[in-house]
Amino acid sequence: MAIPKRNYRQSRPSHIKSKTVDTKKPKKVFIPKPNKGEIRTLVFGGISEIGKNMYGIEYNNTIVLLECGTMFGESSTPGVNAVMPNIQYLKDRKQDVKALIVTDASMKHIGAIPYVTRALGDPVLYTRKLTKAIIENHQNTLRGTLHVSFHEVEKAESVVVNDDVTLHFFGIADNAPSTLGVLIETPSGCIAYTGNLKVSHNKEIIRAEEEEAFKAAKEKDVILSLADSVGSERPGFAITDHEIVEEVDQMMQEAPHRVLIPLFPSQIKRNAMLLEKAFRAGKKTYVEGALLLENLQTASELGIMQMPKESLIPIQEMKKDDDSEEVFIAFTAEENEICEALESISRESYRHTSVITKDTIIFPSPMISANAQATQNLKDRLSRLGAITRSYNTSDVKGSGHANKSELRWMHQLLNAKFFIPVQGYHYMLNAHTHILRELGMSQDSFAVPENGSIIDVSPDGKVIKKQKQRMETTAVSVDGHTLSPVQDVVVQDRNTLSQEGIFIIIVFIDRKTLEVKKSPDIISRGFIYLRESQDLIARVRIVIKKAAEKEAKETGRVEIDKMKKAIQKEVQTFLVNETNKRPIVVPVIFTQ
């Protein structure tokens, strides 16, 4: 029976293209070890992105890892909680991984620890007491076991790893209780890594305690330095947490009613200072989000926050009619995501509380540009409900955990390294960082701007720095839910296809004796076409299904369900692409009688 041809072709965005999944594993590339005496820098992540920070220093048979972070999933990876660096290079050399150093408590630095350390055995993790507690809090949310041995660093300290490597920790200032820097000393020279640098200053004058904290780094002969580049374009000094808190405190005093504020769980010191202000003002403090609550309780236990942890009330205990002026609500937020709780509140679907007229909502950190429009829409909805929104666009409430240009200049003058590798940040930030070095007189051949996967070697005689042409595997690993296994590319692609093209489910009943389709196939369409308005197309699809099923059965002489599914899927997909220019996921379901 001929199938009449009709035009059901629909307009299709130009960016949506049919894809073919390559299920073959990429060919493994052998990367030789560095020559004896060479200082090798390994860049696993953190370049041309914000997050996923992970670097390594390899010397002879020793690898020291710096950071172990994740970044949040993007629109191109639906359903993926986080993305972590590819560590195949480390798996091939796991016996050489002797230390992991974490310099900050944010997910950008600690998020991949449960997955990386499980793959590498039991490396020693060097970090501060607060960061250790945050790592353990994060692990509790994953309900798993940490595969590390902790070494707490709370003062300037030196640790001998082996005959080739000694670690000297420095830059431990009270204004950032989770940060530190490290000097990795080798027979070929010292490598300085400043971590998430943020310099303590008073009106752009470096504090004496900061100068003292960096004294160990100043006294060493540094051949290579690696430093954070996120703030390298911003002039002057970064605003301090103290200045931010004072500005927010002024806003809280001016607020006519309750105060609601989204907070990043990793900004421990700033959060502690803000909550202390609310506590001293007599406000009842509710906290939304398990990790934020745990981190604040930890800060209280360690004496970083001068406020009893019993005063931190989980949002679940809040009565919906608690509309007292003396209420302060802290919500969990993440740097590149809209605060989920405020989003629900703005849509009047949050179960624990709702916006009350004259509530003040303070955004104490800058919007991420990728979410700028979504954030503006959020503020608009909150405003329509009667809330007052205040943010960095309309005040001085803005800040960063990263050093600005003047702080970086101070750091480079102090270290006086022979070679430099900018890390952590988008590529333009890395280039801006090298401009600071040029202004200080460093020559072009004294620094190397990396990409993810870069291998950069300093020669044994300390005369040359060279970025190798060969690169490590860089295909990022997606972490799905709370599982410790990565999501395969085909799964993410299917999710993208579902969001862009929809799904087309076919239910077929076939007689095992006659090898004929017994009745008209049932069809379910979601996100592809509206069935009621496409009855003619559906009728023609049913003819395609019937012909494909019966042809396969008669050629085989029996009903082989897997083969029949493939035959139906192939014919239906071809038909739908020709008719609609769309490629939904086709799922045949076959019943035999």
Image (cartoon, grey):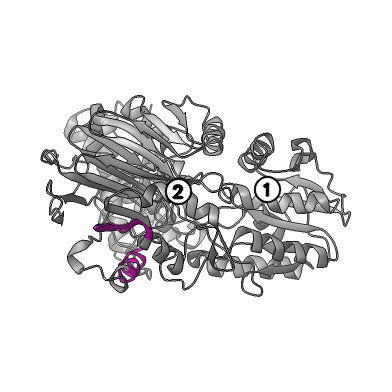
Tell me the quarter of the picture where residue 91 sits.
top left
Tell me the quarter of the picture where residue 170 sits.
top left
Q: Nearer the viewer, residue 239 or 537?
A: 239
Q: Position of residue 176 (x, y in %)?
A: 55, 49
Residue 457 lies left or right of residue 214; in this view the side is left
- Which residue corresponds to the image point at 63% horizontal and 43% vertical from the top-left? 292
The amino acid beneath tag 1 is Ala
Residue 59 lies left or right of residue 528; in this view the side is left
The amino acid beneath tag 2 is Lys
**Is residue 298 highlighted in magenta?**
no
Check the picture and name the quadrant holding the C terminus: top left
Residue 464 lies left or right of residue 535; in this view the side is left
Q: Which mark is residue 108?
A: 2
Q: Position of residue 568 (x, y in %)?
A: 29, 43
Nearer to us of marks 1 and 2 is: 1
Kindly report the distance in space between the C-alpha atoms of the residues bearing marks 1 and 2: 20 Å
Q: Which residues are magenta?
A: 414-436
Q: Which mark is residue 272?
A: 1
Q: SS of the residue at dot 1? A: helix
The vertical placement of 194 against 16, above or below, is: above
Q: SS of the residue at dot 2? A: helix
Tell me the quarter of the picture where residue 205 sits.
bottom right
Circle 2 packing at 10 Å, graded few (<14), some (14-19), many (20+), is: many
Q: Position of residue 511 (x, y in %)?
A: 34, 30
Q: Position of residue 401 (x, y in %)?
A: 52, 57
**Is residue 427 highlighted in magenta?**
yes
Q: Nearer the viewer, residue 572 or 364?
A: 364
Residue 423 visible? The answer is no
